[in-house]
Amino acid sequence: MRLTRRDFVKYTGFGAASLLGMSFLGCMTKETTKDTLIIGYAEDLKLRGDPAKIDRSIPKFCVLERLIEYDLSSDDFVPSLAKKWDVESGGKRIVFELKKGILFSDGAEMDANAVKFTYDILVVRKHSVAPRSVEVIDDHTVAFNFDEAWVLNFAKLQDVHGLGVMSPKSVKPEGDPNGTLVDLIGTGPFKVVEYVENQYTVLEPNRYWFEQTGLEPKIKKLIVKVIPDEDTRVLALRSGEVDVLIDNYHGGYDYTPRNQLSALKKDGFKILTKNIPYTWIVVFNYRKEPFNDIEMRRAVNYAINRDEIAKIFDGWVRPAWNGMFPPEVPGMAEANIRYEYNPEKAKEIVNGKDVGEITLIVNKSQSDQILVAQLVQQQLKNVGLNIKLETLEKGVYKQKRNSGDYNLRIYYIGGSERTFYMRIFWRFLPPEKPWKVYMSDNVTEKAIAVVKEFDKTKRRQKFIEFYKALYEEAGVAPLYYEVVAVAEKPNVEGIKFEYSEPRFYSTYVKA
């Protein structure tokens, strides 16, 4: 039997403590702890206004829960608020039976009407993860209808671009999917008690979540302090202004710089990391010269020494020699891909070709990526390519990306476990968008085959075919495999990773 997250924390948290006896609990009660945990975070949580635009990190895994989750290790979608489901119409319709007795933080029961309200927020906005429609069958049964019969439909229901289930009382007018978010109410371990835009958010334990899991909260308040600048966040941790730094890794920016992690660790701070299906890459503007030529794309791949790039990060990341994703993802190890570092081959391809000046753009707000771009620039110059590096403000970077005013850019594919399938959709499938990284008839056909296939065994083979097609066409130049990181003071205990995300329901701070 597969345990749900609620069952897991119930049986491995409360139950394990009971089995170990009072000695463990006695130690905990004798230890003096603080009642508040302060998190330094890069962005406002967006807890007012458009309910579809709340921050994709802390609110969605501290306050909200989803119908299902995704387990990367097994490539399975697993129950969360949903008890079970039936796939109908070849996959165009999924009917969920909800668990009973799950309460929102205001004490109201989570039911099918709340689920419909939540996903109707996406439907009315025609969001990219929205179903075509949502139907209430009865109080604890809800059906989702989709235009395509794809396994991607499951991914849409648990991806952080979408929403965890929220109470209809979260908006005004109450229950109106077009309404304004005024008070985010979820079923997760914490509830919002105070919010000051662009400054801080205060959360407290949701008593109903803790009662249902059999756990006791070890902190009374969780404060999320907004500190946009990455260096200022690190200084806030060092000074004791905050207890913890966590990454906002959704958009490839706003995280603790990897080149500062070793210094923090040396000075006594604890660094927690988790490997995730997230890869930094060089993106080719393959629609125009010179990188509409597959040989020139291969030259770039030959020229890049991924070991040297990974050294920038003092061993916190892995060089991306073996494909577009790390070996933990479905089918990647079996694809048996290996990028070759061979600058002589790169020189042979480049030699005699008048390609002129090549523009490489990078987001200025990402100090790590500036270092990466500078090294890539040098490695490409070593094989005869004239690289002009442009470090741009975030807005300017996006403008140039969107207009195609570049030859190469530093970007990313993948993300947290829950975004794995959706990032394949967003990066490699039609329709054409500026954030797509590579599309061809062959690669697109194989990517579509992946996100359509419900049979896990068949899907794994389709993954392999997709990875190989992208590799053979040199569609991207992978650089290194990213991690999600938590930097914390030595007196912080109990942060756990679930589905690539740090969770705080067992966290406490020693006095």
Image (cartoon, helix red, strand yellow):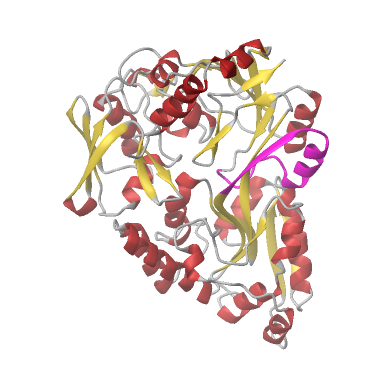
* 172 left or right, relative to 220: left
Quadrant for the C terminus in the image: top right
Q: Is residue 494 magenta?
A: no
Report x, y in % for residue 278: 56, 52
Q: Which residues are magenta?
A: 250-275
Quadrant for the N terminus in the image: top left
**Depicted 438 relative to depicted 8: above or below:** below
**Number of labelled discs?**
0
Q: Residue at x 59, y 29 (%)?
A: 44
* 478 left or right, relative to 347: left
Report x, y in % for residue 281: 61, 60
**Depicted 477 relative to depicted 217: above or below:** below
Report x, y in % for residue 236: 76, 27
Report x, y in % for residue 168: 33, 21
Q: Nearer the viewer, residue 437 or 37?
A: 37
Specify the quadrant of the image occupied by residue 269: top right
Q: Residue at x 40, y 28 (%)?
A: 6
Q: Residue at x 76, y 63 (%)?
A: 308
